[in-house]
Amino acid sequence: MWSLLIGLWLLGGAAMAPVDSLEQWMQEGVALLPAHPEQAVVWLERVVHRDSAYMSPRHGPALYWLGQSQWLQDHTSDALKAWERGITLLQQQGWFDVRLAEAYVRGVFTVQDRRRYARGAEVYQQLLALLDEPSLGAEALHLLKPHLEALSWILPPAFQQRIHLAEILKEEQVPVPNAGQLLLAWWRSQDPLPATRRNERLEEHLERVAMP
């Protein structure tokens, strides 16, 4: 399983790095969010131009924050490109950032970018698989919680009891081994065209959940 990278929105208060360092540019950009995304994007693009896979020890992937600065300016296509690129680059290194992946899934289905539905559904399933990750912490589970709450609307009551979904949502812990694999298997059972690569029922669910 991937190494987990759990990032938090921590702003300001860090020791000053050398002015030409990637970390200093990251801190400048992140500190400007969410109030001044048009200024933040200048710093964050500078980081990504120098090192597109840059991982801040404090703030996480640079491409996550670049996408955030673009999303806040309603440059949604650019934001999705940044997040998708970040997911791909991290996976090439054996890493998976929950915050980056969740932003991408939410973004794809919020703007109904159907060209990215298959990829969005794939990343969503990778998020569900993290429920079986021993190192999954409370912060990551908090990011997954809206998706689990949406599943509580459609999962059969017996299945919810089987994976103790109510306890997961209430206590923010995973008491049942293989809960992620059980959810993935359930989604496979809902696929109307299992011989194809895409699961239309899953994509419809994610689109419906993202609707305002």
Image (cartoon, helix red, strand yellow):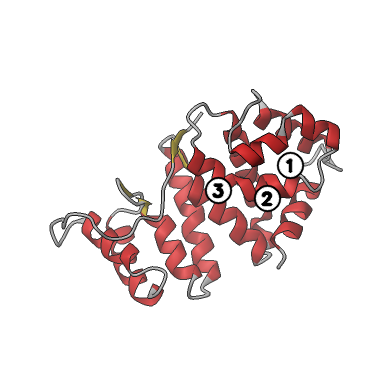
In the displayed image of the protein, which residue is found farthest to the left?
Answer: 18
Q: Position of residue 210 (x, y in %)?
A: 69, 60
Could you tell which of marks 3 and 1 lies nearer the N-terminus? 3
| C-alpha distance separating marks 3 and 2 | 21 Å
At horizontal 28% and vertical 60% (from top left) the residue drawn is 12
At horizontal 49% and vertical 36% (from top left) the residue drawn is 137
Tag 3 and tag 2, C-beta contact below 8 Å: no
Screen quadrant of the C terminus: bottom right
- Tell which of 164 and 194 is nearer to you: 164
Q: Which quadrant of the view contains residue 115?
A: bottom right
Element under disc 1: loop
Q: Which residue is mark 2?
A: 118
Tag 1 and tag 2, C-beta contact below 8 Å: yes
Element under disc 3: helix
Q: Position of residue 109 (x, y in %)?
A: 67, 60
| C-alpha distance separating marks 1 and 2 | 8 Å
Q: Is residue 153 left or right of residue 25?
A: right
Q: Position of residue 4 (x, y in %)?
A: 45, 36
Q: Which residue is mark 3?
A: 143
Q: Is residue 156 left or right of residue 128?
A: right
Say what amino acid the circle numbered 2 marks.
Ala
Q: Which residue is mark 1?
A: 197
Q: Classify 10 Å Cα crowding around label 3: few (below 14), some (14-19), many (20 and above).
A: some
Q: Is residue 56 above or below residue 113?
A: above
Q: Nearer the viewer, mark 3 or mark 2?
A: 3
Say what amino acid the circle numbered 3 marks.
Leu
Say what amino acid the circle numbered 1 marks.
Arg
